[in-house]
Image (cartoon, grey):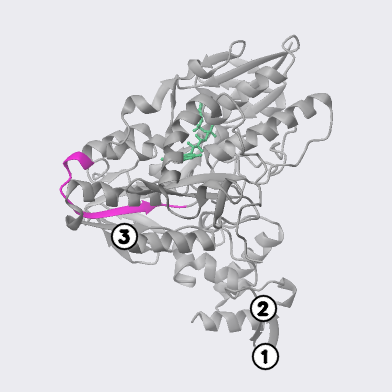
Amino acid sequence: MEKIISGKNIAVNEEGYLTDFSQWNKEIGEALAKEANITLTPRHWEVLAYLQESHKNEIPLSIRKVGKSGVVDIKEFYELFPQGPLKTATKIAGIPKPVSCI
Amino acid sequence: MKRLLILGAGTSGTMMANHLKHELDQEEWEIVIIDECDTHYYQPGYLFLPFDLYAPEDIQKPIRDFIPRGVNFMHEKLDKILPAEQRVISANGDSFHYDLLIIATGTKPAPDETTGMLGKEWKKSVFDFYTYDGALDLRNKLREWEGGKLVVHITEMPIKCPVAPLEFAFLADSYFKHKGIRDKVDITFVTPMSGAFTKPKATAALNHLLTEKHINIIPDFAIERIDNDNKTIVDYGGSSVPFDLLVTVPTNKGDALIERSGLGDELNYVPTNKGTLQSKDYPNIFVLGDASNLPASKAGSVAHFEAEILTENIKRYIAGEPLKADFDGHANCFVETGNGKALLLDFNYSHEPVEGEFPIPGIGPLRLLKESRMNHMGKMAFRWIYWNMLLKGTHIPFVSAAMSESGKHYDK
Ligand SMILES: Cc1cc2nc3c(=O)[nH]c(=O)nc-3n(C[C@H](O)[C@H](O)[C@H](O)COP(=O)(O)OP(=O)(O)OC[C@H]3O[C@@H](n4cnc5c(N)ncnc54)[C@H](O)[C@@H]3O)c2cc1C
């Protein structure tokens, strides 16, 4: 599937997650944040960078992992990205939605 | 004489002892298995005990009854694994050398991970059913409970048998119906996931059942704490859900032994190669069942499929041959839906549960992802299969370790 994000054709899945991280840049991030009614601050960007780094190193992400990362605690993570912070933040970061292990 | 040491004599460890007994040369290899318990609990029975559907004696037997002759069972609590020295130390100071180690210490609820869970309402109006004691205490509570707000809750993922909380909600619906007090009970299912299950097709089927049974669902709820005074669970986002009776599945964690040994991730699960079941850090350590960090369901059926592949890999390792990366994440779970019915899920790492027939394509007799009485018979038969076939490592007819794609109705 494709979607126009900040004027560009971007490959996404049914839930709107980018399927090709190389298409991601800060403008795309800003546009996706806007869709989620979030205004990105430097704090948000630090968290997003951490998520992207974890993804690159194939570290499976979970709320607990983020909370123990030293980058942000769970409370603040929820303040930055209300309602399902991991789902929202990974979408803005252009990485896949973490699969909750079953 | 070389020694193969198995840590934990639960579902996985017991199966491996039975498999390897036949496969290893007894002149060359001694097999030792250690557990701190001397009772083997049939954990799937914890779902039925609270509703008086099983009695305590149905779900426990002596561990020794399932350890084959020639395998040495030691009843000891394990303190530490010292991989560099190829040794394991028990709590009373005994030291066990090993040439090959299989970690099968499982996972268990850790209610202390959530603020307020072990507060003054614990075992008064806050219960868990993932332990034998928890399930029994809950049975006694349900026998006398007269109704109100029942909240069935998952603290965080992953948990073992991820469908069990949902099954609990379904069984509660039929339990209160039979008691004639369903109209006095309001059932809410609260989960950190975005729906009833993680995979789309199964979620749709299960959401439908929740609606049909008048069970409310609150998804995406990440619990911060339990407020014992107001009897509510509170989410990090600030929302809260009131309860009169909370049945929660606490955070599940691998045993503290793994943490003490420096072998685990943040939930004490051992990083494991998902195809070969070998530890990522030490070639002579293998991990089976709930103790690993595999992205597969933590379930007895999964451990059963893993055990067949692990047996093969242990033989290869001993013979100095390359390991087979054959484990595909195959899981097969009955989901009890109440009123004598159940549905069945069969899936793996790459294929989500879909509709179809199982185990024989086009015939069944079991139906995938659809409620039926036959599936319920399957779930009930599972207890017999568990005690008489699964633990003994007997191959279950028609059901192979690698998931079969035939008989399943995938989208084209
Ligand atoms: C409510 C419920 C319902 C379930 N329903 C199903 C179902 O329908 N189908 C299904 O397939 N699975 C089901 N399961 C899951 C299944 O029971 C587990 O996945 C399975 O038992 C895992 O086996 P295991 O050997 O890895 O761990 P376990 O069977 O838990 O064994 C671990 C063993 O290690 C021992 N141990 C741990 N630490 C130490 C230590 N430090 N020293 C000494 N010994 C130690 C323990 O005493 C235990 O005996 C259910 C589980 C629950 C809780």
Label 2 chain ID: A
Of the numbered discs 1 and 2, the one sitting upstream in the chain is 2
Asked whether, in this view, residue B113 is left or right of residue A55, the answer is: left
- The part of the image, by quadrant, that contains residue B258 is top right
Q: Hey, what amino acid is under mark 1?
A: Gly
- Same chain, marks 1 and 2? yes
**Residue bounds of the magenta highlight:** B142-156
Q: CA distance from mark 1 to mark 2?
A: 16 Å
Where's residue B374, x and y in %? 44, 44
Q: Residue furthest front?
A: B363
Note whether B329 is above or below A66 in the view shown. Answer: above
Asked whether, in this view, residue B193 is left or right of residue B311, the answer is: left
Where's residue B181, x and y in %? 17, 51
Mark 1 surroundings within 10 Å by alpha-carbon count, few (fewer than 14), some (14 through 19), many (20 or more): few
Label 3 chain ID: B
On residue B215, which mark appears?
3
Residue annotated with mark 2: A1
Asked whether, in this view, residue B390 is left or right of residue B59, the answer is: right
Question: SS class of the residue under badge 2?
Answer: loop
Residue placed most toward the observer, B309 or A62:
B309
Q: Is residue A20 visible?
A: yes
Question: SS class of the residue under badge 1?
Answer: loop
- The part of the image, by quadrant, that contains residue B294 is top right
Q: Hey, what amino acid is under mark 3?
A: Ile
The answer to whether the residues at label 3 and label 1 have Cβ atoms under 8 Å apart is no
On residue A7, which mark appears?
1
Q: Quadrant of the N terminus of chain B?
A: top right
Callout 1: CB less than 8 Å from ligand 1: no
Residue placed most toward the observer, A44 or A37:
A37
